[in-house]
Structures are given as structure tokens and as C-alpha cells.
Image (cartoon, rainbow, N blue to C red):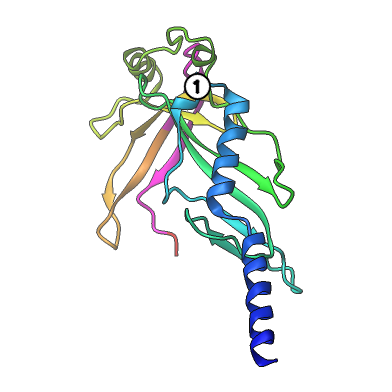
């Protein structure tokens, strides 16, 4: 009788383990959803890596707190998982700065929590055309026309995707003043110039501070 009970418990344990969703299955499924969204030609610009920030959520406890777990490959998800967020890094190697990170969000029923976000992929990438962004030299010229001339440091235009404006922009930081803080850090006032990467229009020219420690 004792051995029958042990055998029954073992069988139940194996069945429970077999019913657990494996992380590799979720990662493979996320890749299929991504291919459906971007197509076979563009999937080569996306990469999922072991340490890129993918994770899954457990169901909220009685206090409403929702624990998260890192998504490692070749593991089994906890029984009470609710969502898995698989992160992919988009990188178009021909132009430095045309890159972004996107999460494929999968629910308990193995469906998508939301549509795959694709607004960071430029039209010319979709259409397999040459870039229609203004170049760095043009962005430098626009910076010279709009930023205060000083002898202090000015960064080179950095091409980034602004998720709030849903467009690619060039960002230039221009130092206006410089001093040492009580902590020995360089600090001062600076200008932040934001340029539309498509048409070269100045979107913002704001003033801010750098080198300030917030405690």
C-alpha cells in the first residue's frame, strides 16, 4: 500500500510537471508572432538574447502585488504565471541609431496581450529603399544655426527613436556653463536641441542642467 501511494504521488508529480509551460515554447511562440508582424524579410533585424530583459509575471497575490521572474531558456514557468514579456532588440545595421527594443507580450492562453509595436521601423526599411533621413553633417549644420556658440563641449548629433513623438530625431547637447559641484562633478547649464530626422525641422530647443546629483 505504501509503495502504491508513492507511485501515485510520482505519477501526479510527473503529470503536473508535463503540464507546465516551458520557456523555450514561449520564446518560439513569440518569434512566430513577431514574424507574422514584420515578415520574413525584416525578422533578420530582430534578436532575442538570454540576458536582454525578458521576464514573466505571476498572478497577483491577495495584496495585489505581482511578482516578476526573469525568463531563462530551458526552464519551466511557475504554475501561476499570467503574462510573459519576451524582449527583442531591433537593429538596422546600415544606420547607427535605427534601433529599438520591443516586447512580445503573451497571455496565459498563449495569445497576444496587445498588438506588436512597429512604429520604430522607418518606412524606408519596410520598403527596402535608401534612407531618407538627413545626415549627421546636415544635423551639425542645423545645430550651428540654432545653438549658442560657446567654447564648451557640444555632443555630436545622436539619432534616436523618440517613442513619445513616434519618430526618429537627432539630439544635440550643448553646454552653456561649467563648474565643479561639491562632489567634484562637472555641472552647469546646457541646451538640448531636437531635430526631426526626416525633414530637418527643429522640434525643441530647451535649456536644462547636467551633472546634478539628485538625492
Quarter of the view holding residue 116: top right
Which residue is rendered at x = 69% and y = 79% of the image? 8
Is 93 included in the stretch rendered in magenta?
Answer: no
Residue at mark 1? 42
Choose between 7 and 75: the one closer to the eye: 7
**What's the magenta bit mostly, secondary-structure-wise?**
strand
The reply, left or right, for residue 178 in relation to residue 19 is left
Which residue is rendered at x = 52% and y = 55% of the image? 71
Q: Can you say which quadrant of the picture contains the C terminus?
A: bottom left
The region drawn magenta spans 192-213
Which residue is rendered at x = 41% and y = 20% of the image? 146
Which residue is rendered at x = 69% and y = 86% of the image? 5
Query: Residue 87: x percent and y percent?
Result: 52, 43
Above or below residue 203? Residue 174 is below
Give SS at disc 1: loop
Q: Residue furthest right?
A: 62
Query: Residue 179: x percent and y percent?
Result: 27, 49
Choose between 9 and 105: the one closer to the eye: 9
Residue 99 in view, yes or no: yes
Q: Can you say which quadrant of the picture contains the N terminus?
A: bottom right
Choose between 26 and 67: the one closer to the eye: 26
Give the crowd class for mark 1: few <14, some 14-19, many >=20 residues within 10 Å. some
Is 205 included in the stretch rendered in magenta?
Answer: yes
Query: Residue 31: x percent and y percent?
Result: 55, 36
Amino acid at each position: 500500500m505504501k509503495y502504491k501511494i508513492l507511485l501515485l504521488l510520482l505519477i501526479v508529480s510527473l503529470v503536473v510537471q508535463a503540464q507546465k509551460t516551458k520557456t523555450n515554447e514561449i520564446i518560439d511562440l513569440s518569434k512566430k508572432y513577431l514574424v507574422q508582424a514584420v515578415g520574413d524579410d525584416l525578422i533578420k533585424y530582430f534578436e532575442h538574447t538570454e540576458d536582454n530583459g525578458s521576464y514573466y509575471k505571476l498572478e497577483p497575490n491577495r495584496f495585489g502585488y505581482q511578482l516578476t521572474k526573469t525568463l531563462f531558456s530551458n526552464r519551466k514557468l511557475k504554475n501561476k504565471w499570467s503574462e510573459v514579456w519576451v524582449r527583442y532588440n531591433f537593429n538596422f545595421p546600415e544606420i547607427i541609431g535605427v534601433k529599438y527594443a520591443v516586447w512580445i507580450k503573451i497571455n496565459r492562453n498563449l495569445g497576444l496581450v496587445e498588438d506588436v509595436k512597429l512604429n520604430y521601423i522607418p518606412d524606408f526599411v519596410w520598403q527596402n529603399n535608401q534612407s531618407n533621413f538627413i545626415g549627421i553633417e546636415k544635423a551639425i549644420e542645423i545645430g550651428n544655426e540654432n545653438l549658442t556658440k560657446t567654447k564648451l563641449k557640444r555632443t555630436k548629433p545622436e539619432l534616436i527613436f523618440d517613442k513619445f513623438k513616434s519618430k526618429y530625431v537627432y539630439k544635440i547637447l550643448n553646454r552653456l556653463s561649467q563648474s565643479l559641484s561639491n562632489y567634484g562633478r562637472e555641472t552647469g547649464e546646457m541646451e538640448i536641441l531636437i531635430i526631426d530626422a526626416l525633414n530637418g525641422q527643429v522640434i525643441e530647443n530647451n535649456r536644462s542642467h547636467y551633472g546634478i546629483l539628485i538625492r
